[in-house]
Each structure stands twice: as C-alpha cells, then as structure tokens.
Amino acid sequence: TLWILDKEWEELFVNNNYLATIRLKGINGQLRSSRFRSVCWKLFLEVLPQDRSQWIKTTSDLRTSYTKIKEIHITNPRKAGQQDLIINNPLSQDEGSLWNKFFQDKELRAMIEQDVTRTFPEMQYFQQENVRKILTDVLFCYARENEQLLYKQGMHELLAPIVFILHCDHQAFSHASEAAQPSEEMKVLLNPEYLEHDAYAMFTCLMKTAEHWFSTFEHDSQKEKDVMITPMPFARPQDLGPSIAIVAKVNQIQDHLLKKHDIELYMHLNRLEIAPQIYGLRWVRLLFGREFPLQDLLVVWDALFADSITLNLVDYIFVAMLLYIRDALISSNYQTCLGLLMHYPPIGDVHSLILRALFLRDPKRNPRPVTHQFQQNLDYYKARGADLMNKTRAKAAPLNINKVSNSLLNFGRKLIAPAMASGGAVGAPAGGSSFPPPAMPIRSTVEAPQHHQQHHHQHHHQHHQAQQQRMMKSESMPVQLGKGKGETCAQSAVNLTGQSSKNISSSPSIESLSGGREFTGSPPLSASKRDSFFSTISRSRSQSKTMSRKESEEELEAQISFLQGQLNDLEAMCKYCAKMMNTHLGKCSTLY
C-alpha cells in the first residue's frame, strides 16, 4: 500500500512542472480517487509555496501560528491567574475584563454551533462531537481574527469539505504507514494531529477570495469598490441588496453571461421576474455546496481551485447549470422554475458541467462538449416551488386597514381642500368654537327677516350642502374604517393631515360633517351593502386580533425587511447623488 502512495506522490509532485500537472488533473476530474487531494488543494489555494523544499517549514509555521491564535481567542477566565478582581469578575463590563470577553465569545460560539450542527446532516462523520468542535473552533478563531467580517452564515459549509478531505487523506496515509516507513514530507503534511491547524490555514486562504461575497459593501476594499456596480436610482430590486458585491456578481452572470449564451432563457427568467439573487446568492457563496452531493461537490471544487485562486470559473459553472435545466425552465411557470432553481436536479456526470463551463469561457481552446439536458418529471419541482411560495406568502405582512384608511382620508381632504377653502368662510362664526356645526349658520341665515336675501341664502345653502355631501362621500369609508368611533378616528385623521390652524378653522371639521349629516338632503347609503361591507371589515379585524404570537413575529419580520429595503433604496440614492455632486463640483473647480 505504501508503494502505491509513493508512486502517486512521485507522479503528482516529483517533476519540474508538477503544478501544471496537478492543475490539469483537477480540471479533468482526475483527483476524485487521489490520496493527496488535500495537498493539491493547499497548492491551489497557495497555502504551500511552489518550492517543495519550503513545504515542511511553511507547514510548521502555519501550525504554530494557529496554536497562538487559539490561545489568544479561546480563553478560560477561571484559569487566568492573579488579576484585579474589580476588573476581572463575572459582573464587570470593562473592555479589558476576561469575563466580559468570555460572555461575548459565548454568544458568537452559540451562533456558530447552531449552524455547525446542521452541517451535512446525512453524513455520520459530521455528527461526531470532536468534528463539530473542530469546525466551531476554526470558525470562531477566523471570526475573531477578522473582526470586520466576523462569522456569517454559510461559512461552515465552505469549511466542512476542507475538513472532510483532510480526514480522508489522513485515514489513507495512516493505513499505508502501518506497513512501512513513509517519507518525511508525507509524515509532516499528513499528520492527523494537525487536522484543525491545516483546515484553518486552507479556509483562511479560501476566504481571501470569498470574503467579499459575505461582507457588506461598507467593509470592502477600495479596489473591490471600483469593480462593483454603482447603485443607481430607480434600479430593479435585484440591483440592490445587503451585500452589493455578491448581488452585482449574480446580476452580471444572469444579465450578461446568460444573455450572451442563451437569450431565450434570459428573457424567460426576466419575464417571470426571477431575480438571480433568489437562487444565485446561495450558489455562489457556498460554491454550489447545496446543489450537489458531497462527492460530486469535491470534483467541482477540484476544478474551481485548480483553475485559479480567484475562482473565475464560478461564473461559467453557474451558467452551465442553468443551461443543463434550460428546456425544463423554458417550459415551466414561475412555481416550477423556482423549484428547479432552489432544488437543483441530480446530474449523472458532474464533470460534464465543468467541460461545458470551460467551453463557454473559451470556445477556441476547449472542445464543444456533449450537450446533456435534464428530462425528468417536473411534478416534484412544481411541488417544491409551491412550498417556497407558500412560505413567502406566510411571511408577508397583512394589510394595515387603519393605515389605508388614513391614507384615503388624507387623499380625500387634499382633493376637496380648494373647494372648501372658498366656501368655508360662510360657515365660520365670528367667535366661539373653532369647529361649529356647519348647518347652524345656514339655518339662522335662512330664518333672517330680510326677505330679499332669502333666495340668495337658499342658493348658497344648497351649494354648501352639495359640498358637504361630496365631503362625506369621500370620507365616509375612511371614517368607518377607524377604531369604531367616528369622532376619534376623524380627529386623529385631522391631526395627521398637518394643516394649519387657520385652514382648519376656516373649513368644516370631520366631526361637524358626520354630526351634521341629519341636516343634509343626501340620500343614505344602501343598508345591506353598508352592513355587508363593514361586517367584512369587522371579521378581518377579529381575525387580526386572534393572530398567534408566531404570526405576529413573522409580520414584524416582514415589516422590518420592507423597511430595510427602503433604507437600502435611500442609501443608494444618497450615494448616487453624492457621486453626481462630486462630479459637478469637480467640473466647476476646473472651470474656475
């Protein structure tokens, strides 16, 4: 067995151009059964230098560095030795307190552990406590070493395959070394005692490329900001998001690469309004970790890492995956398309996707691969899409009736404000209350002894009644949609309109209109229609009052998400305006 290991070692690493050899093997899917896949990945990710004579020293230095990092960040305040108890006690809020740091670390570890327990639940290896502890410690140390990023959900799914291939290589080496003495390089590089140390080094190098897919644009470097698409006003929802770098990337893939290679599919997804971040954020951030079984995923990662540490092949694998299910997507509605994209179908030969991606990127250097199309029953994906849509609807915020009623009320007042401003002076008394019943001055005017003015006042009375009728019709629904008392809702609506006291005093109030309805000659509303309408409103209110606590929390989450989207829109607009302002100021400075 050791002879087989030595032979493979020499084939992979003992030649002048060994790096090109292993890159070619990785792209062609020939590392699937390799016992040194972890060593190849270290070379691809530049954990190890190309100079073989430096491998042992570099490996030793990296392991020593991780040991120190772990000692710094994973501390036990009970074993801290003699320290000032005023600062170092469990109740201290001092920044230098080890206990304060301990409790902060405990919250971070709890968040990481929650994700780690869900890592590859179908595999027994990841259910072992020692493996979960390794994953948690590596992610925790990375978060503490990168405070600007910390830990983001999904990082555990990038670390898990790295830990798994290290474990597999260690197992193969352990079995082989039982029969004979391996070389010094093998013993150092494949020492099982340093699995955690090696995993941290590899994960850190991988995150140098993948970091900006997890970070928000506030933390990106200037060079990356220049590459990003500048947020534009009135952009599509997919053009803005919590992480501009990743959103810009998936938009570029769908809007440019997919459009270039299959405009019909591109138009179909646009017609269905399927934004690329609905499915693409997970595809890119996890490097397709949830779209393939682990063994197939490792083949994909072989090609991604072997091609370039910049992971440029990700974009073309993304498009190749869309083209594999192209026919199914084009023949499907929104629901089924969503199921296909969020539950990617199994593929017989995952290497065919890599060949397709290489051809899409450079058709001159790569032969056209055999075209494979997904041709299975779509009922399963239709059902999965329906489940996703139902979950989305369940989280949607219900209609706020009071908010709608106030909006309609304000709109109605704005419509009739000009007409009421001209006729409101007649209904306003010389003194007394600011909100008199409008019918009273009219009635007293009609009863005046001057007979020659009776016709004039009667005409004005009819005109004013017509204004009242229009006012009541425009505001009857909002008033009734209030909290049950017309005066209370009306007064709150008057306050919401924000009108000046002068305008309010010169125009009839809503209380006076609702109270003076008996003096007008307008016909009453149909009793049956009015009762059925308001009974529906009452039922909706009673249903909203009986909402469970969970539904209330989901409503709040949906409202928070909506407000966050508005904040993102405003922030993007501010940045755009600031950029335009800087541009104009620069032009002005050059002119003067």
Image (tube, helix red, strand yellow):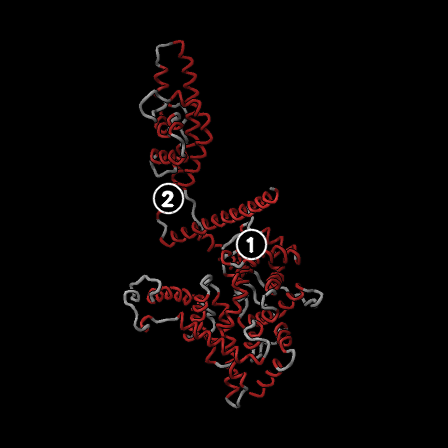
Q: Give the residue displayed 38% in from the left and 51% down from the top.
A: 552
Point out the image quarter for the C terminus.
Answer: top right
For this orientation, the residue located farthest to the front is 592
Label 1 is placed on what type of residue?
Answer: Ala
User: Is 510 above or below relative to 63?
Assistant: above
Instruction: Point out residue 570 in the picture as x, y percentages from the top left corner.
Output: 49, 47
Q: Is residue 202 left or right of residue 83?
A: right
Q: Which residue is mark 1?
A: 275
Q: Position of residue 175 (x, y in %)?
A: 51, 85
**Residue plotted at (46% across, 65% down):** 146
- Residue 338 can be seen in this image: no
| 27, 328: nearer the viewer | 27
Three-letter residue code for mark 2 = Arg
First reached walking from the N terminus: tag 2 or tag 1: 1
* 123 relative to 325 in the view: left or right: left
Q: Nearer the viewer, residue 318 or 334?
A: 318
| SS for callout 1 | loop
Q: CA distance from mark 2 to mark 1?
A: 35 Å
Q: Residue at x 55, y 50 (%)?
A: 231
User: Considering the numbered disc 2 on the image, is that residue within a helix, a strand or a loop?
Assistant: helix
**Contact check, label 2 and label 1, Cβ < 8 Å:** no
**Looking at the picture, how far across and down is residue 203, in whole percent?**
50, 70
Viewer-nearest residue: 339 or 123: 123
At x 57%, y 85%, the residue is: 5
In the foreground, 565 or 325: 565
Label 2: which residue?
A: 541
